[in-house]
Amino acid sequence: MPRCARRLSSTGIYHIMLRGINQQQILEDREDNEKFLRILKDCKSISGYKLYAYCLMGNHLHLIIKVEKEPLDQIFKRICGRYVYWFSP
């Protein structure tokens, strides 16, 4: 069953949750956390979003961001693509 289409926020602020498939660890250690935070910082300068808060857990993470320059799907395509490229062997 397909998921419902994402509703656009009138404020541009979103709570994003990313998680591993089957509760797989996506942030295994401190190095992974630091790398993900560097990717967020680098992508922020390119995509022009505001990061209000984050919470990094082992098998998932939460972000509160405000979209400004680039659409949400493009932002996360960039962030996730960079992290997966680094994380996957």
Image (cartoon, grey):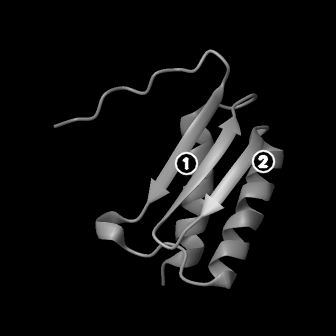
For mark 1, what is the residue?
77
Residue found 44% across the figure and 76% down from its top: 25
Residue 25 in the figure: left or right of residue 4 = right
Question: Looking at the image, do the residues carrying marks 2 and 1 touch, with CB atoms under 8 Å apart?
Answer: no
Mark 2 / mark 1, whichever is N-terminal? 2
Q: Residue furthest top?
A: 10
* 25 in relation to 22, above or below: below
Left or right placement of residue 61 versus residue 54 in this view: left
**Residue at figure coordinates x 70%, y 73% from the top left:** 35
Q: Give the x, y percent position of residue 27.
A: 55, 75
Q: Quadrant of the N terminus?
A: top left
Identify the disc placed on residue 44: 2
Tell whether 48 sits left or right of 81: right
Front in this rendered view, residue 1 or 58 = 58
Within 10 Å of disc 1 (Cα), the crowding (few <14, some 14-19, many 20+) is: few
- Residue 13 in picture, x, y percent from top left: 65, 29
